[in-house]
Image (cartoon, coloured by chain):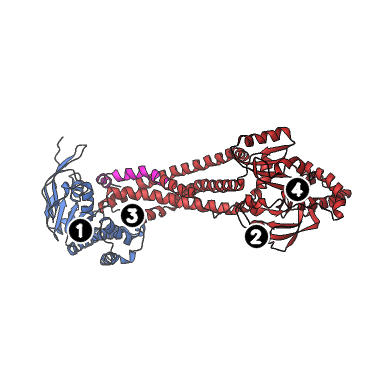
Amino acid sequence: MKLLKLAYRNIVANPLNLILSIILFGLGIGLINFLILFNNQLKDKFEKNLADIDLVIGAKGSPLQMILSSMYHIDSPTGNITIGEAKAFLNPRHPLIKAVVPLSLGDSYKSYRIVGTTDSMLSFYNTSVIEGNLWHSDFEVAIGRAVADDTGLTIGDTFHSSHGFTDDEDFAHDDSSFKVVGILSATGSVIDQLILTNPSTVWNVHDHAHESDIKKEEEPHNHEESETDENHEGHNHEDHNHEGHEHSKSHIENNQPYAHTIEDLLKYPEKDITTLLIKYKSKTNFQALNMPRAINENTDMQTASPAIEINRLYAMIGIGRQMIQWLAILIALISAISIFIMLFKSMKERKYELALIRVLGGSRTSIFALIILEGIILTLIGFLVGFLLSHLGMELLSNSLKSAYKYAFSGFAFMKEELLLLGVSLFIGVLAAFIPAWQAARTDINETLSEKG
Amino acid sequence: MLTTQSLKFKYPEGDAFEFPDIYCPAQEKLLILGSSGVGKSTLLHLLGGLINTPTGSVLIDDQDMMQMSNAKLDKFRGENIGIVFQKNHFIRSISVLENLLIAQFFAGQKEDESKCKKILDRLNILDKQGKAIKTLSEGEKQRVAIARAVVNAPKVILADEPTSALDDNNCSEVISLLEEHAHTAKAALVIVTHDSRLKEIISNQIVLTSPIFEK
């Protein structure tokens, strides 16, 4: 215990060296730990949101985009498909499909996406209504936990949605108001960030919307060129325009389509949905493995496997991550060398002190342990600095990461890999101190004391 | 009680020394005189157990340090020998009082703060207890070194040229402090020096002559 105290005092007696070593080591460890935290939380998020879904079917386009938009809700959809096209996969008696959930996207509230779906969506993401009820009629919604916490919406509140996925009042649908009827339990997955309703709500809000859009378009100064197009999800929006035009008369006469279950959906083969999330009965069934190719080749729809697309995404971002990782390792290595040099130099400067410890009765082992302890203390402080920096950085970045990834990152999530990093740090301390400690321990005290310093 | 018998030491590079037998009982004083190069420092290091590869023996209370293993010798030295060097070294990162406490720690004794303070008080440097070593004057450092040499109540106190850098006043003061504290600690006091002023103070003397060269 006393040796530890002496080691500590020796370290703090040299503040310049201490600060230099700690900044270097702390920076290296901080960067590595930040990567660990970020990576783990991202992976965790990706894996949680896979929700055991085997296949996504949607409009042709980029498969990755389709996965990101309909499973992670961070990109625009590739477009819409009609229920007629997707009919076969909605059939509950489909021999290969265990469960299917249709998604209709297009609107948002304060950048939280409104998703028209069926109640099976809840079981896909292992959530349930903990307050209020599920939606029963159009414009009733159940909101995810994060939506409730962030927007302050509670049961009975109403709100207006915006067209597209950005929070922009220009695209507000003024005439349709949503009513919160339920709040879902927290899951840590993407469903916490969603506003769920039935599929026909999405149709009906869009039909309303297109009327007002058309009105806007009649006034030239409200027309906002390409930006408007982008926010309106490109060509799919044009499809809507045609439809909206045709159907607007019918729903004004209070004859609007209503769909709550999959059976309801099948009554409107001309209506749109965005994607289908599918779980197979058997993941290894030969026919199931062939189904995606058949769909891609023979229909206007495409399929994508979430696991494959996410692995592709990982591979793409992996290169950048690896470079940062190597940089961090380099910094840690340089700092280990600087700790070694610092200890070696201070050991040489203190050779009389170390000889004196022997004169006072300290053994070679005590000398060795003293210098090793100094190395460990340096790297321990460095680790703590890096640990704090990385968690602080994560917490500070969590807000911007949250809007980018639709996932709550946290600076207060601790990983078991961090324990490993602590072990590695202390090992580096021992390693850097080993040669100075060994040198100091074997130094002959008689010779040292005979030198007239 | 300190005794040596037919002590010889040869450096690997060549210098070889043969020392006369020494005997110094507890609470007695012995002056070892000699000019430079006759092996004064070598003898002090032998007596202090800092070298343990000679022929012959160095006994403290009938225990031969030359026969001890390294680990045992380290422990024995800490418990039984206090050394005041010509140029005193301290652990710079800690205070005066802590330098005494760490001496107790390395000697494997219980750390006794009040005992350390009592010794500092007797040496008139109690007010320096919390100070860093580098803030002390040379005379104060000498006193701290004496305090550290006696703090573990050793059986032998060795002093290497304790007065060579001091004027007459300080010289006699340091010697009387050493004598006083060695006496209180019931230790044998051995002073190795070429300072002829000490001849009049300590009567029990051994004079080292030229070394014997054996190639």
Tell me which amino acid carries mark 3: Leu
On the same chain: label 3 and label 4?
yes
Mark pair 4, 2: CA separation? 32 Å
Q: Which mark is residue A3?
A: 3
- The image position of residue B198, as x and y in percent, is 17, 56
Mark pair 1, 3: CA separation? 22 Å
- The local crowd at label 1, few if under 14, some if 14 to 19, many if 20 or more residues have their Cα within 10 Å, is many
- The image position of residue B186, as x and y in percent, is 16, 62
Please state the chain letter of the residue tagged with numbered disc 4 in the rendered image: A
| Magenta region, residue range | A428-453
Q: Which mark is residue A149?
A: 2
Q: Which residue is mark 1?
A: B154
Q: Which residue is mark 4?
A: A265
Q: Quadrant of residue A337?
A: top left
Q: Which mark is residue A54?
A: none
Please tell me which of labels 4 and 2 falls first in the chain.
2
- The image position of residue A304, as x and y in percent, is 66, 39
The image shows a total of numbered marks equal to: 4
Instruction: Specify the colour of chain B.
Output: blue
Q: Which chain is red?
A: A
On the same chain: label 1 and label 4?
no
Name the side, left or right, on which A428 lies relative to B151. right
Mark pair 1, 4: CA separation? 98 Å
Is A431 contained in the magenta span? yes
Tell me which amino acid carries mark 2: Asp
Q: Is residue A426 visible?
A: yes
Please tell me which of labels 2 and 3 falls first in the chain.
3
Q: Judge whether B83 appears above or below B15 on screen.
A: below
**Which of label 1 and label 3 is nearer to you?**
3
Say if mark 1 contacts mark 3, CB within 8 Å: no
